[in-house]
Image (cartoon, rainbow, N blue to C red):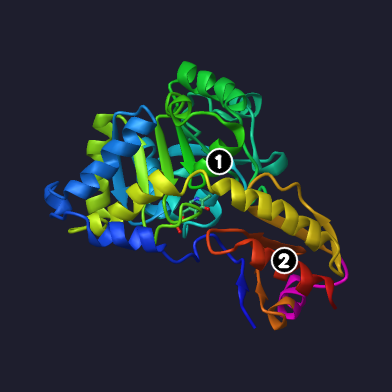
Amino acid sequence: MQLLDLRSDTLTQPTAGMKEAMFAAPLGDDVFGEDPTVNALETKIATLFGMEAALFCPSGTMTNQIAIRLHTGPQKEVICHQYSHIYLYEGGGIMANSMASVKLLTGDLGKINASQVAESINPDDVHAPETTLVSLENTMNKGGGSIYTLDEIKPIHALCKEKGIKLHLDGARLFNALVETGESPADWGAHFDTISICLSKGLGCPIGSVLLGTKPDIKRAKKVRKGFGGGMRQAGFLAAAGIYALDHQVERLKEDHHRARVLGQFLIQAPHVAEVLPVATNIVIARLEGLTPEVFLQQLSSKGIKGVKFGKDLVRFVTHLDFGDDHLEEFGKRVGKN
Ligand SMILES: *Cc1c(COP(=O)(O)O)cnc(C)c1O
């Protein structure tokens, strides 16, 4: 039986075209700043977002953690939603890497707004950690792949600017949002101090994330990356995959979103699925009744379908490059049957 693995959009294999681009890449030592392909990727993506500079890193956790290190430190505080990847899924890195405090906000679909942020900025007072950073996530993973529109960002950006607070975007899946809204990368680049983009999610690369920011910030980021052990040598092999993905595998994210919506419709018909959260992009979250996620997933596993537990009564499925229309049809057939 063919396995339908929907645990994450990181599970994809590089396409033939991507592999070809990787093996054809000119290489050099990137710690010396001499890998032409890494340099080309960094320039390409910085230009796309209208930002001054970019830094290629092994993971999205590293790009986020570098940004947090740039904008916080001991006795400083970052404001973010309680579902944020930077808080939940980065190994406690905010504390371990930056010794910073976190203020967690609530909000529908993992999103926060400017008035909440305004209320959460600490006064200039000896008792409180100093608020120096707001971090947003788009799309919002634990919010069900939900999308922030630029109109929702603008008041937060204006507030941060007024208060002298930095604004970071965990844009691991930012391209998933952009292909849906039609907004341009440059519009997003204009509203953040730093942006982190994953190449290894829907874009289908085997590895890699990019941090975008000002020239001085990226210069400092390079040093932090070295300190984190993330300086890579002939990394052009990997950067070439990123260039290929930006050229060939962005628009196709729409297909993942379409398949996710259909998958949600199949799922709602499955026994014990009480609700499927609104499907905005490639993430489908279902709420179960009368069955634990563990048992539900075990039953699906015996039918060759894999998802993950995403809360005490929630399961998550993510569509991706290696999940096509025939897989979708097969998913429908298998979940319908008990
Ligand atoms: C995957 C992901 C990251 C980065 O994860 P890595 O596995 O370290 O690349 C960051 N933020 C979000 C929202 C993610 O989904």
Q: Nearer the viewer, residue 292 or 104?
A: 292
Count all numbered tags in the image, as a single digit: 2
Residue visible at 22% across and 49% down?
Answer: 37
Image coordinates of residue 20 in percent, x first then y, are 30, 61
Q: Is residue 39 left or right of residue 316?
A: left
Q: Nearer the viewer, residue 19 or 283?
A: 19
Q: Is residue 45 magenta?
A: no
The image's mark for residue 329 is: 2
Q: Main secondary structure of the magenta part?
A: helix
- The answer to whether residue 324 is above or below residue 83 is below
Image coordinates of residue 137 in percent, x first then y, are 54, 41
- The answer to whether residue 192 is above or below residue 42 is above
Is any part of residue 148 visible from this angle? no
The image's mark for residue 138 is: 1
Q: Is residue 49 left or right of residue 202?
A: left
Query: Secondary structure under badge 1?
Result: loop
Q: Which segment is the magenta one?
A: 289-299
Residue visible at 34% across and 38% down?
Answer: 45
Q: Nearest to the eye among marks 2 and 1: give it.
A: 2
Q: Quadrant of the C terminus?
A: bottom right
Residue visible at 47% across and 29% down?
Answer: 188
Q: Quadrant of residue 271?
A: bottom right
Image coordinates of residue 32 in percent, x first then y, are 11, 49
Q: Is residue 207 left or right of residue 262?
A: left
Label 2 sits on what residue type? Glu
Label 1 sits on what residue type? Asn
Query: Secondary structure under badge 2?
Result: helix
Q: Is residue 293 magenta?
A: yes
